[in-house]
Amino acid sequence: MRTSTSDKLRALIDAEARRAGFDAVAVTRPDAIPLAPARLAEFVADGFHGSMEWIAETVQRRAEPSTLWPEVRSIIVLAMNYGSDHDPRGILEKRDRGAISVYAQNRDYHDVMKGRLKEIAGKIVARAGGDVKVFVDTAPVMEKPLAEAAGIGWQGKHTNLVSRAHGSWLFLGTIFTTAELEPDKAEIDHCGSCRACLDVCPTDAFPAPYRLDARRCISYLTIENKGPIPHEFREKIGNRIYGCDDCLAVCPWNKFASAASEAKLAARADLREPPLSQLLLLDDAAFRAFFSGSPVKRIGRDRFIRNVLIAAGNSGDASLTPIVRGLLNEASPLVRGAAIWALSRLLSDREFGDLAATASKTETDAVVQEEWLAAPARSVKAD
Ligand code: B12
């Protein structure tokens, strides 16, 4: 039997993907996601993208790979398992600790994956010639529908890709190539009647199965959202200070997944249960040093402290009060506003009232001033 050039190229891709530490690799065609354009357009029309204007601005290129790059003939989708060896929901009970989502406890996957994708892409060009482009996350590429079309998994009701072999814990990346490769068979939906991911969401971010309103998703609220966290979500966020794993963690398909191997995406032990008291003290330089190489660094210190202050407000831990009070003097209105909310929950009514009477007088920022006036429901009291 003769082996075609495309079969040999495919064998090379499979071998190189394994060598580079990817857990799955499959091929699809640029025209394999015909439903994506309308669904993406609906997502944007409904405003589900919130302040992620970069999605709305790239709808056409994002939903149609050949608009992004007309020369593309095949798309290679690669996936890396980042499953944890413990249930990430355990930390949600430890209110004096910050919950950082599993993916962000690792080295930034963009950095880890991009270098490896480039290596594989280089091998493809060396063997087959032509041209290649590699993408992880940030490019206008719909990685999940492409991964489903390639057969790596299916988009679950939580909208993420689920695989029978790796559950919900996969990072995705793509290599676009001008080489002609035989496409793999698309995967079908195996969610059945399960709705665990929809029901567990603390902020009701799923208006329907397979649809996410990002504006309500804790991942969006703590990572993408640049302004104050809307009041309606603050209590529900609990101690989640960067991203959220709840919808992934309850997925029954995770029982077939193994923990990611240490060498690939080792979780940093000090990011597993960091004390809020330590995190609140991070100034800009300390924040950058502590989160060096971590995706958390991307949101910057002020947005991060905003998140930690929400967790502090939910902690019921009065020992945090002096540090939080100190943050009222911050230059950043975002930090001052979140500190006010945290204090309104940590101090007694009288203490908070006394503080508001003096401190609010010197506040010049209108949005922060509103935080003093809004003094929310005070269900969690330290006294
Ligand atoms: C924008 C974005 C976000 C946004 C919006 C998420 C979203 N679901 O769109 C926010 C900030 C909320 C987010 C959060 C997270 N993200 Co994100 N994010 C992206 C990004 C950059 C684009 C996704 C996108 O195109 N959204 C637009 C919507 C319209 O597309 P969609 O999600 O595919 O929606 C489809 C479904 O709704 C479906 N659909 C609609 N109606 C119907 C009806 C039926 C019947 C069916 C079957 C389907 C269906 O069609 C739509 C189009 O395909 C991708 C990287 C990339 N370039 O693809 C990473 C990515 C999706 N994120 C990722 C991760 C890991 C996360 C988090 C887990 C991080 C965390 N722990 O906090 C959470 C998960 C939250 C969640 N449940 O989605 C991974 C997911 C890997 C995987 N296994 O799927 C990606 C692929 C990054 C990567 N390279 O690995 N993310």
Image: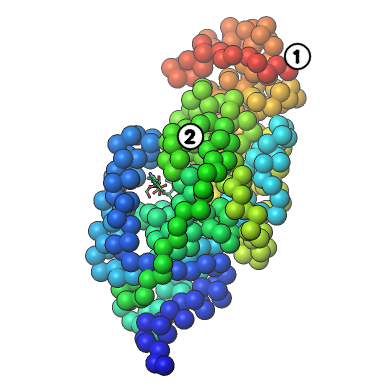
The residue most toward the front is 193
Tag 2: amino acid: Ala
On whether ligand 1 comes within 8 Å of the CB at mark 2, the answer is yes
Indicate the quadrant containing the N terminus: top left, top right, bottom left or bottom right.
bottom left
Please give the name of the residue rendered at 70% of the width and 54% of the height, measured from the top-left corner. Answer: 85
Q: Quadrant of residue 266?
A: bottom right
Q: In which quarter of the image is residue 5?
A: bottom left
Residue situated in front as seen by the camera: 277 or 44: 44
Say which residue label 1 marks: 383
Tag 1: amino acid: Asp
Indicate the quadrant containing the C terminus: top left, top right, bottom left or bottom right.
top right
Q: Earlier in the sequence, mark 1 or mark 2?
A: 2
Q: Quick check: marks 1 and 2 in contact, CB under 8 Å?
A: no
Rendering coords of residue 278 (x, y %): 70, 37
Q: Is residue 178 above or below residue 334?
A: below
Please give the name of the residue rendered at 41% of the width and 63% of the height, measured from the top-left corner. Answer: 186
In this view of the protein, can residue 331 be seen by the observer? no
On whether ligand 1 comes within 8 Å of the CB at mark 1, the answer is no
Please give the name of the residue rendered at 68% of the width and 36% of the height, measured from the top-left corner. Answer: 92
In this view of the protein, can residue 35 be seen by the observer? yes
Q: Is mark 2 on a helix, strand or loop?
A: loop
- Seen in the image, is 325 located left or right of residue 17? right
Rendering coords of residue 379 (x, y %): 65, 16
Q: Is the residue marked by circle 2 packed among few (<14), some (14-19), or many (20+) residues within 10 Å?
A: some
Q: Distance between the residues labelled 1 and 2?
A: 33 Å
Please give the name of the residue rendered at 57% of the width and 41% of the height, measured from the top-left corner. Answer: 196
- Seen in the image, is 140 located left or right of residue 161? left
Say which residue label 2 marks: 205
Rendering coords of residue 382 (x, y %): 73, 18
Residue situated in front as seen by the camera: 233 or 166: 166
Q: What element carries label 1?
A: loop
